[in-house]
Image (cartoon, coloured by chain):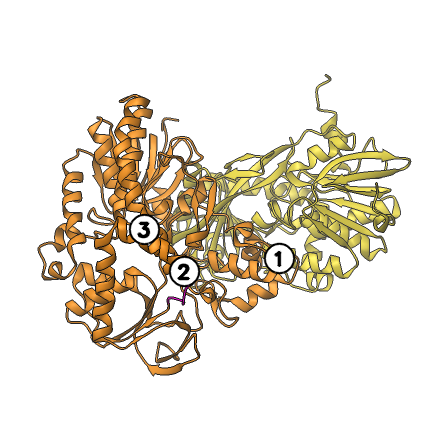
Amino acid sequence: MSRTADLVIVGAGPAGMAAAVTARRHQLDVLVVDEQAAPGGQIWRDVEAVSCKPQAAFLGNAYHEGLAAVGRFRASGATYEPNTKVWQVEAGPRAFLTRDGAASSVKARSMLLATGAQERPVPFPGWTLPGVMTVGAAQIMLKTSGQVPVEPVWIAANGPLALLYAAQLLKMGGRIAGFLDTTPAIDVSATIPKLAAAAFAAPGDLLKGLGWIVNLRRHVPYIRHVARIEAFGTDRLERFRYETASGVAATVDAHLLLVHEGVVPSIHPTLSLGCVHNWLGGQDCFAPALDAWGETSEAGIFVAGDGGGIGGAAVASLRGEIAGLRIAARAGRISAVEAQAAAQPIRSRLKRALTARSFLDAFYRPRASIFVPADETIACRCEEVSVASIRAQAAIGRPGPNQIKASTRAGMGPCQGRQCSYTIASVLADAEGRQVPDIGLYRVRPPLKPLTLDELASLDDVGCPT
Amino acid sequence: MPDVSEAAIDTIVIGGGLHGLSASLHLARAGRRVVVLERSWVGRHASSSSAAGVRTLNRDLAELPISLESQDMWHNIEAIVGSDCGFRAYGQVNVAEHPKHVAVLEKRLALTRAAGYTHEELIDRAELTRLIPAISSHCVAALIVRTDGAADPHLTLRAFRRSAESAGVTIHEGYGVTAIERVGSDWQVHADGRSFVAPTVVNAAGAWAGDIAAMLGDDIPLGHKASMMIVTERIAPLLKPVVSVVGRPLSFKQSDQGTLVIGGGLQGSADIQAQKSFVDFSELAKGARAATDLFPSVGPLRIVRTWAGMEGKTDDHLPVVGPSPTASGVYHAFGFSGHGFQLVPVVGAILADLIVHGGTNRCIEALSADRLMARRPAA
């Protein structure tokens, strides 16, 4: 089956929903597809259902803002298809999907990729042991099913998401054995102007963050500047060792260690489209090059939200609206001048919403060893390839990531390199005396999401419009 | 200006794919000083995108003599390149799903038997099921070469590269050839700001070999293929032989890692000049249908990646192997049309014969460039 739409939106988080609402306001035929069962994205995951459950009381006001956004989206008249995987996007634009085990394609005049962010992988020796998991995964369990770990958990993390999770966990009666703050000591003088700007632009957010930290330090052991972590265990995590930048070290027994080092844009879709990408030095990641409307280097293909650079929910919504205006103009529903005028006030709000970001980026920059971990660390967890074996290959010629993939199988597993591509690039850069942006990432090979043979066999595109 | 340090080259091999590496290896072992010029990196295109089938089954009779010799070399590959290249001789099987397709197999068998070959064998359903218990019971018979099989393309590349370098071959990666000119009786090859001079040149430039041939003065029509492949997640051992099927696009095997590797020549698309290829999922769905029809149990398996590899294709699907009809000192090895992997060991040996001894006893008459150039309509 093949269909058409004026606009196909991939992802029903803040950016995707806002773009859908805007495009619908201008009478576009909009199809929104999303992997989850309900709208909201990661930040407002399952917000409609959760709002009537006990854990809603502990998830904070920001979560409830999501309920209003989802309400506007539900009322917009966009066709919404949950539980749908997008496994291929092509210039055209065209998206290939599976829903209920059947594959189909959609041809659209414009496509908006609002696929958000993924947690930055945190490789250290022992990080692949069962019992080591990410804060993001733990938070999903907390949000959707109110699951609180039975035993006290250890958290080794850097960034606002981990602080938020810790605050939510404590409110819900969970216990934290210790919070290892991996935020490196920073150059204060360089950060103060950014801090001042952030405080001026978003005093509420900043106070909220400080409140979390103060509360956390009052209730749980809080160790700052943790620089090294090593996890041990035979079949699962049994204990781990940490060491601070000043050399204070300890080994503790643990069954659950939650780690987090911020999030990075999900760029597999734009990489596979061959879009131009830029290196965002401040966020240590690549992001697709976007114009002022969020359009990529591929005509008609837009990105809004964290997939275009980390900005959070408010920024994502505004960028979704801006993209929606340009997409309406492309469809001839409004003029370029009208789009520009309508975007003006949104751009002002966007500028304000972004002010705090450079402070957060500078303050929460991950420690260097996250990028170039110790030799014994597993770099590619799917194929169990160590950093040492990447280094051994790097010594032969000056291989790029694709040659490393061929020679070591790193990146060939089911995660499609999402867990190891930055590690490989950083290790190669380190070994070859080059910079990560010059090394680049693996070439992305479709499908973007695992697709079964039965599902592909069901794809019947005969007579599809081109 | 030619590099002084490179002044003493005997042969410049253009193209660092498996055929370029094999030619350079055989030449170096015959005492020749060889430089390989590779535009990107060793094995960048067809060589690493290959299904790595080691197949004599159903080969065109014109290339069967050298294919059979190459097969002997594969069975001895460790002695040649110091690695087994992941070669497993579990057989190649061409399956008939319908009784009417058995006639196709019988006709093929009669053809090879009439030409004096005995390597192919017709097997019934019982033997097919014994060899491949997982195959769907609707399959009625098959043609098999029990000594065929498949290798690992990456291990093969690594082994040929290491052997070539050990034999003294210099490989320059990142050197794309921009121009070639005649200097006296030598060839001067310009590549990314450097130039290399040698009396003999091997053109093993794969999908781009037509451009290189033109630089050398040969106008040889060359098309291209963009054959697609599917790799699934790893599963427990399912089958050993490589399976293809009459009348449908399928090549189906399980790798040593446990992944299923599914190809069969389904075509994606390619922008050869931009070195970009694209998977066509509507087309690839046919391969998934063929795979799940023959092996119903694999339907729920996840596809981990797909790709389309770029490769040169001739009008008659036979390669060009031999000296240039017009330019002295020039030797071609390209246009393998999607089935060149198995021929890698022998074609390198043939080129060494031609360059070192001025001729070969191996049967390559049908593979000359003349046959294709003659077909080019007069301008």
Colour for chain A in the figure: orange
User: Where are the magenta residues, as a range?
Assistant: A183-187
Q: Secondary structure at mark 1?
A: loop
Q: Residues within 10 Å of mark 3 (few under 14, many from 20)?
A: some
Q: Indicate which label's residue lies in the foreground, 1 or 2.
A: 2
Q: Secondary structure at mark 3?
A: helix
Residue A181, position in %: x, y?
Answer: 34, 70
Q: Amino acid at mark 1?
A: Thr
User: Where does label 2 land, which residue?
Assistant: A189
Residue A133, position in %: x, y?
Answer: 33, 67
User: Where does label 3 land, which residue?
Assistant: A197
Instruction: Pick whichever, A83 or B103, lies toward us.
Output: A83
Residue B59: mark: none
Q: Residue furthest top?
A: B379
* Both labels 2 and 3 in a single chain: yes
Q: Are marks 2 and 3 in contact (CB under 8 Å)?
A: no
Instruction: Report the residue at 48% width, 60% height from top.
Output: A423
Q: Amino acid at mark 2?
A: Ser
User: Where does label 1 land, which residue?
Assistant: B147
Q: Indicate which label's residue lies in the foreground, 1 or 3.
A: 3
Instruction: Pick whichever, B54 or B246, lies toward us.
Output: B54
